[in-house]
Image (spheres, grey):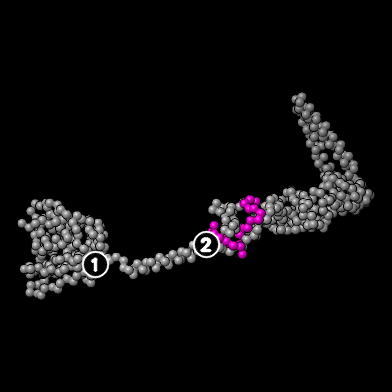
Amino acid sequence: MSPTTPRLRPELKATAAEEAGIAYFDVSDPRTGSSLRLYDFEWLIAQKLDGRATFGDLASWAGGCFGFAPTAADLVVYAGKLDELGLLETEAKPAQESDSGLLPLDLEEGIVIDTEPEPVVTAKTPVGAPPPPAVPPPPATSLAAAPPAIPRAAPPMDMALAATLPVTPATKAPSKPQFTPVPMPAAKRGPTAITWVLGALLLAVSGIAVWMLWLAPMFAPVKVRVETVGKPQDVVQYYEGTGSVVRSQPTTLSFAAAGKVGDVVAPGTDVKAGMTLASLDVATPLEKELADVRDRAAFYTSQVDAATAKGKLSEAKKFEKKVAEKQKRIALLEGQVKSLRIVAPAGALVSEVLVGVGDDVAIGKPAVKLVDQQVMAELKLTAAESTALQAGDPASLVVANRVKAPITGRIRSVEAGTVRVELTDRHAAKPGDPVAMVRNRLSGVTPVPAAALSKTPGGGHQVYLVIGGKLQLRPVLVTEKNETLAYVSNGLAPGEQVVVSSTASLLPGAKAVAE
């Protein structure tokens, strides 16, 4: 009875390949990482080595599939070569017979491969035809050379199979099978001397590049521009616009009604808001009548309260009508008196009287001129600066020749970039003095060029200092900063050298020299 086949290792991976029109399978061993190229029919027969079928069954199946007739003995030799290459299990599992006593051999059985191979159809050679040429061996491929991880010693990877399956046509009697050796691809060789030399040169070049680009700058002093830090000082910042102290322009007041002037104020009089400056002669009797009507309205109002308290509602309503009549008369008289008088709108000085007592005047006739006694400063600021200011805000001014003596005041008006400031002390400046408006005052700060600053990871500010010939990075507190200057309130000491040139490529601890 024919012996049972050994078992092919199930973890082997096979990938279909084709070259020059010939089908192959590249078989890889996951244990060792090595690989082997077989003809397609060699691999398909190897797949049937399952430890259950006999070599006779396998020979019958192969003769019906591939157009040549290997014997059981041929297959035993072939299996032995596969075993030498470490492709078979050490001990085959016992065969399990089917109901018919023979195991069905099917192309669909076997281990799973990475890529489904295309079916290989080999036409049987007609009787009397010359035998087909031998299949050429597969091209050599560079393979891994790790030894197989099996108990027995494996042959070297560059040896060839001693015998492969015969390619004798199936129609001929298999008197003696023909064998075509399939050479194993040469194993990868280790690095040559040239490879080692090239690798050493590459490492040397890489080391030089690292030194030139990174390490050398760390050791070579970098040239920087520096400025010496001065003592902290008080800094006054001004608005960009300037102005001057101006004289107040006189204000002319006129009558709102026609008539004869009955009274007028004298020139040079200091007046307060609400004070009567001039009136027509008919204003006096109207003012007397107005005073009388106000008294009567007050009397009737008291009567309404008394009647209401006694519960005499009908009597109270009578007095309420009287009160309403008097209030209506009061409103009429007040309107008439207002048109007959000129009243000061604010505190001022009467600079000129244009009418006299007894003069007849028409409506709108100029009568009195007033001059504001407060000294005003008028400044022209930029639109952005003036927008942030409002009437009533306190203001601080500085006369050009008295910088250390600021003048206090209050903003009177802001119109179209023109700011008018009323000085608290009208004797602090005289008309025509040039003035500037203070925007901010900084105490105990050190000015440094804005270019010296860079950002810390947390969003603050820092500067580079040259201390002992090396660069030192130090955080600083900046009170205020503009395009050219930064005002540092903490972090710098007088006499230190701060770097004012570009700091983008500087590294802390690097050597540095001042240009």
Can residue 341 be seen in the rendering of this structure?
A: no
Q: Earlier in the sequence, mark 2 or mark 1?
A: 1
Compared across the picture, whether 29 is left or right of 394 comes to left
Instruction: Please tell me which residue is depicted at 11% across the width and 71% down the height of the picture.
Output: 125
**Number of residues whose C-alpha sits closer than 10 Å to that of mark 1, classed few (under 14), some (14–19) or many (20 or more):** some
Give the quarter of the figure containing the N terminus: bottom left
| Residue located farthest toward the front when viewing the structure as drawn | 468
Give the quarter of the figure containing the C terminus: bottom right
What element does badge 2 sit on?
helix
Q: Which residue is mark 1?
A: 186
Give the distance between the C-alpha atoms of the residues marked 2 and 1, in whole angstroms: 52 Å
Q: Position of residue 7 (x, y in %)?
A: 16, 56
Instruction: Please tell me which residue is depicted at 87% across the width and 39% down the height of the picture.
Output: 289
| Residue located farthest toward the top when viewing the structure as drawn | 310
Magenta span includes 505: yes
Q: How many marks?
A: 2
Which SS type dominates the magenta stretch? loop
**Number of residues whose C-alpha sits closer than 10 Å to that of mark 2, classed few (under 14), some (14–19) or many (20 or more):** few
Nearest the viewer among 199 and 426 is: 199
Q: Amino acid at mark 1?
A: Ala
Q: Position of residue 441 (x, y in %)?
A: 70, 51
Magenta span includes 19: no
- Residue 219 numbered tag: 2
Magenta stretch in the rendered image: 489-515
Nearest the viewer among 160 and 395 is: 160
| Residue located farthest toward the right when viewing the structure as drawn | 358
Instruction: Please tell me which residue is depicted at 90% across the width and 52% down the height of the picture.
Output: 353
What element does badge 1 sit on?
loop
Nearest the viewer among 47 and 478 is: 478
Q: Amino acid at mark 2?
A: Phe
Q: Position of residue 320 (x, y in %)?
A: 78, 33
